[in-house]
Image: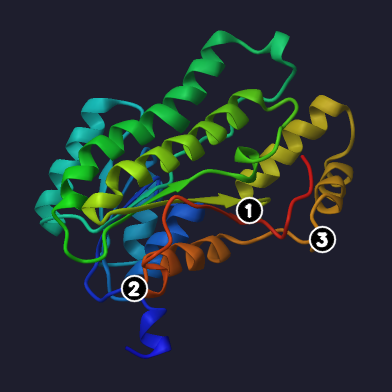
Amino acid sequence: MSFMDALRPPPGLRVLVSAGASGIGAAVAGAFREMGARVHVCDIDRSALERLAAEAPGITASVADASVPRDVDAVFDDVKNALGGLDVLVNNVGIAGPTGPVEALGRGDWERTIDVNLNSHFYFAGRAVPLLKASANNPCLIAMSSVAGRLGYALRTPYASTKWALVGFMKSLAIELGPHGVRVNAILPGTVEGERMNGVIGARAAAAGVPAQTMREEYLRKISLRRMVTAEDVAATALFLCSPAARNITGQAISVDGNVEYL
């Protein structure tokens, strides 16, 4: 196998991307499709799924709330019908959660963040693992964590807590599934350009009582490369992790963040 071949995911991979209709999820789904994979996505946003279907024909989809176990079960029924099995799960589900000091956060905001950002990953992994164990095509599970999964994040404690937990979940699964030939890694995106980041910056600026542009400049000062990353940067890392070149990479939390120094 040439080096170029080793850097490409095997053809015909069967891939499921959760929260795959927009942002990082859509970039990951599109990248795998471009490499010849068969891709299924799920998302809570029906209109975003319809846009994705128009832009990327051939990707199959399910409408689902990833924090609801019966919805996750329905997704895997669709995966079996559409793909006939699974080689790659990219567990991309996550919300920003509330912004504010811990004493001001509501219990409901905390619980919703835990349900979406952590419990959903448990539900998806539980259904995906038997299919990944049955795969003979370089099976992989990728958990989408965050730079907030390696750094503390003031005023974003629910979000950071879930992202740290995902790293522990991933490392434990890597040990558990390694003997079955299933590799498990986490990607930790940093500050990703896009609408979601604009919302986070706006909320944090409001909490701090400063203009949004001032807060944006503060974010950039915390990054060694002084630039945000893109969804495509994250998607490229996911492709690499599912390629033969990464066949001995498992149990790793890989930052794609320009080296965020602190949050």
Q: Earlier in the sequence, mark 1 or mark 2?
A: 2
Location of the C terminus by quadrant is top right
Quarter assignment of residue 225:
bottom right
Q: Residues within 10 Å of mark 1 (few under 14, many from 20)?
A: some
Which mark's residue is nearer the viewer, 3 or 2?
2
Q: Which residue is mark 1?
A: 194
Q: Residues within 10 Å of mark 3 (few under 14, many from 20)?
A: some
Q: Identify the residue at image location x=39%, y=51%.
A: 20
Q: Using the numbered discs, state the Cα–Cα distance from disc 1 to disc 2 in whole angstroms.
A: 27 Å
Which mark's residue is nearer the viewer, 1 or 2?
2
Residue 156 placed where, x, y %? 68, 28
Q: Residues within 10 Å of mark 2 (few under 14, many from 20)?
A: many
Q: Identify the residue at image location x=62%, y=31%.
A: 160
Q: Indicate the amino acid at tag 3.
A: Arg
Residue 89 placed where, x, y %? 31, 51
Rendered view: 243 above or below 181: below
Q: Indicate the amino acid at tag 2.
A: Pro
| Residue found at the very far bottom of the displayed protein | 2
Q: Which residue is mark 3?
A: 226
Q: Which residue is mark 2?
A: 9
